[in-house]
Image (cartoon, coloured by chain):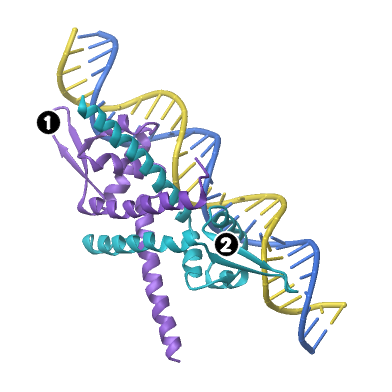
Chain colours: A purple, B cyan, C blue, D yellow
Amino acid sequence: MDQTKQFKKIKSCSSQCVLAVNDTLNVVSGKWKLPIIASLQYGTKRFKELEREIVGISPRMLSKELKDLEINGIVKRNVYDAMPVMVEYELSASGILLQEVLDSMIKWGLQHRKMNMVRSN
Amino acid sequence: MDQTKQFKKIKSCSSQCVLAVNDTLNVVSGKWKLPIIASLQYGTKRFKELEREIVGISPRMLSKELKDLEINGIVKRNVYDAMPVMVEYELSASGILLQEVLDSMIKWGLQHRKMNMVRSN
DNA sequence: GTAACCACTATACTAAAGTATAGCACCCGT
DNA sequence: ACGGGTGCTATACTTTAGTATAGTGGTTAC
């Protein structure tokens, strides 16, 4: 009976947690989100700069993903109306904090590769 | 000139890192991987147990995702040929270590929700 | 005036991920 | 001999993600 209570607690915690993890996954999953975030790690960038740095991305995808990241509060978009309109993108506070998550992913990824002695790309 | 060297270093590190992160993402992304891993967090489970616990999953998806996770070394599949053949799934060492990554995702996810004062589902 | 840069958007497509539904082969209980 | 459980697989479909290619409207440089 006390056990049932505990199970419920575990279940509600774990569903909260699954939500939080999904939030995080939505933010980083997809082919281009990571390269964009990585590219912005070292400072603000303009559209064309990103397009040039991220090899293979089309402007459609870059535009779409930046919009996504902006909506999700990861990236800030600053428009300066100098006369050839200038737009700069930078990471938000949340975006910067993402680095911790990425670090733990890097750690796990390298660890896992070692444990499984290389596979995939 | 010394700078160019450093840039190269940064670039090669960051491409290594992007690979590692992608390994991690491949392992956890998709609609059902997380619920499966979460379900196995509390001990070994059989196919039908997982199917019942993970609401909405079809046997096709469960089978496919389990195969995926097995190939990627996240889940171990143990077949006991008791007379109604029994199959048990459990997390591998790597799978268990994933919890650290998930924890940092949970942390970020909750943090981010607070900073953005709730959106989405 | 025309070529090129900037920051995109539109349209149309292909490929990958996920769903729905059915079925198989085996076993057990009644 | 049937209804139900276990551990799946097969086929066909829809939905989402990503690609390819072209075009817009403004600015500046030659």
B97 over D28 or under it: above or below: below
Q: Residue B19: x, y in percent?
A: 41, 43
Does the rendering let one see residue A70? yes
Quadrant in which the C terminus of chain B is drawn: bottom left
Q: Quadrant of residue B103?
A: bottom left
Q: Residues within 10 Å of mark 2 (few under 14, many from 20)?
A: many
Instruction: Indicate which label's residue lies in the foreground, 2 or 1.
Output: 2
A51 over B31 or under it: above or below: above
B7 over A18 or under it: above or below: above
Q: Residue A115: x, y in percent?
A: 48, 53
**Chain letter for the residue marked with disc 2 in the picture:** B
**Chain letter for the residue marked with disc 1 in the picture:** A
Numbered mark located on residue B115 in the image: none
Residue C30 falls left or right of residue A79: right
User: Residue at point 37% right, 59% down?
Assistant: B101
Q: Label 1 belongs to which residue?
A: A82
Q: Residues within 10 Å of mark 1 (few under 14, many from 20)?
A: few
User: Given the image, on which type of amino acid does mark 1 rest?
Assistant: Ala
User: Residue at point 36% right, 44% down?
Assistant: B17
SS category of the residue bearing label 2: strand
Quadrant in which the N terminus of chain B is drawn: top left
User: Given the image, on which type of amino acid does mark 2 rest?
Assistant: Lys
B11 over A26 or under it: above or below: above
Toward the viewer: B71 or B35?
B71
Q: Residue A74: x, y in percent?
A: 26, 50
User: Residue at point 20% right, 39% down?
Assistant: A44
Numbered mark located on residue B76 in the image: 2
Q: Quadrant of residue A52?
A: top left
SS category of the residue bearing label 1: loop
How many angstroms separate mark 2 from mark 1 (CA)? 59 Å
